[in-house]
Amino acid sequence: MEPVVVDVPGSVDFTALLLIAAREHRRQAAKHEAIELSLLADYAAQHPTDEYLHLEIAAELQVSPRYAQTRLALATTLTERLPATMAAMRGGRVDRYRAEKIVDATANLTVEEAGQ
């Protein structure tokens, strides 16, 4: 595990440092999750006609087929329709939960509308 480096403003008590470290850990987790989603989207792009792709991903990641299917859908949607949201995840500014809410909220929009 990588050490967490945090910017500590002025004098802060130890308990506040715990929350600062927890917040930074969540940012790093969002960044790592964005990397995984990008890799899944890239893999899917290399296998566009494979209807069993989610089963292959499930086996490799050791997750259920349904979970793999959900992750794959999120990965391709963020990559193709919502690249700004994916960029925000890569920057640690948006976590998976918020990204999923953005995907849900923009589902009925065109690609152009969703990108605004």
Image (tube, rainbow, N blue to C red):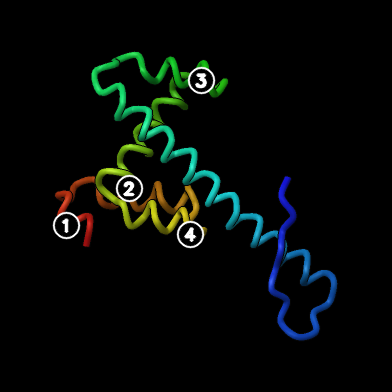
Q: Which mark is residue 113?
A: 1
* Element type where label 3 sits in the image: loop
**On residue 64, which mark appears?**
3
The reply to whether callout 1 and callout 4 are in contact (CB within 8 Å) is: no
User: In this rendering, which labeled residue sits more in front, label 4 or label 3?
Assistant: 4
Rendering coords of residue 17 (x, y %): 78, 69
Q: How many discs appear? A: 4
The residue under label 3 is which amino acid type?
A: Ser
Residue 27 is marked as none
Label ID, residue 91? 4
Q: Do callouts 3 and 1 mark residues in contact (Cβ within 8 Å)? A: no
Quadrant containing the C terminus is bottom left
| Labels 4, 2: front one | 4
Q: Which mark is residue 103?
A: 2
User: Percent from the top left, x then y, of residue 28?
Assistant: 60, 54
The amino acid sitting under disc 4 is Gly
The disc labelled 1 sits on which kind of residue? Glu
